[in-house]
Amino acid sequence: HYRPTNMTVVVVGPQTLDELESWVVPRFGRIPDRWLEKNEGTVEGATEEAAVEKWAKMQKAAAKLVNEAANDAPPVSINAEKKPSFCPSFRPQLQGGKWPILVTVLPLKSTRTLVLYFPLPPTWHVPDQSPTRILSHLFGHEGPGSVFALLQDAGLITSLSAGNRVSAPDQNLFQIQMSLTADGEENWKEVVRVLFSYGRLIRDYAKKSMSSHPGQAEDTTRAEYAKLDPLRRIWDEVATLDRMRFDQTSPGHVYSFAPALAQSASKYGTTYCLSAGSL
């Protein structure tokens, strides 16, 4: 894995692109591929046909290495596999056939926290259409009628957050985390019951949304359909907010922007690394 062809370099600065390129290319563009030199010899001075032939041999050798030593390693780039496999780290087969698993911890600090984890299929290949985005919005919503408002009014929780704990090429691990009150700790099963009931409500609305589409009724406008399909309306609102943030938000601090952009470029490529997940 540690080869120059797998590297992504991001440099952020006030200089022009030409000046930044003049700094980066001489320093990073000539990093030798020791693995290629060891197995195929140096490529300097080689003809284009020889380079293509050596590249084909290198691909075969790499495939052999992956097959022998990294069978469980998923592809990093979304272009590496359009239909990624689903291989969650948490599944009944790995927990002795029991599901779900309850883990309790006695903390040294005085704190009451309830965390629920849900293994979900990967969404790397659809960053702008990830269902976990709307799940995070719905479960994390704190307005009137939300699951948070219901549990807070009942005196069971003081905070709630939802989102991906793990987002990998072969799996997602969706997390719902809550801070409980003393009463909530004693009645944590009731908190879980409310959350699962809300999840079933979302599932039922999703089934209704999938069974109908605006195109099925030509005389139904999108505004009218939004009233009949609340999930579609909420999705449109979330997408609109994401686009507004993308258009209005500055890059931020370079020490966080550069590594985040490098990681995004390795996953989505240079064309979509800035906008993936925002449009």
Image (cartoon, rainbow, N blue to C red):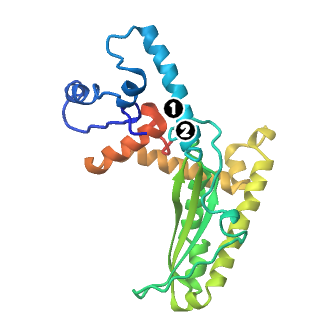
Q: Tell me if residue 227 comes above or below residue 159 in the rendering.
A: above
Please state which of residues 275 and 20 is positioned toward the viewer in this rendering. 20
Quote the CA–CA distance across marks 2 and 1. Answer: 6 Å
Regarding mark 2 in the picture, which secondary structure is present there? helix
- At 57% from the left edge and 76% from the top edge, which residue is drawn? 149
Do the numbered discs 2 and 1 sit on residues whose CB atoms are within 8 Å?
yes
Label 1 Cα neighbours within 10 Å, binned few <14 / some 14-19 / many ≥20: few
Q: Indicate the position of residue 35 as horizontal and vertical percent values.
A: 39, 30
User: Which label sits on residue 66?
Assistant: 2
Q: Which residue is mark 1?
A: 62
Label 2 Cα neighbours within 10 Å, binned few <14 / some 14-19 / many ≥20: few
Side (left or right) of 67 relative to 179: right
Q: What residue type is disc 2 on?
A: Val
Please state which of residues 136 and 101 is positioned toward the viewer in this rendering. 101
Q: Indicate the position of residue 131 as horizontal and vertical percent values.
A: 62, 52
- At 44% from the left edge and 85% from the top edge, which residue is drawn? 107
User: Which label sits on residue 225?
Assistant: none
Regarding mark 1 in the picture, which secondary structure is present there? helix
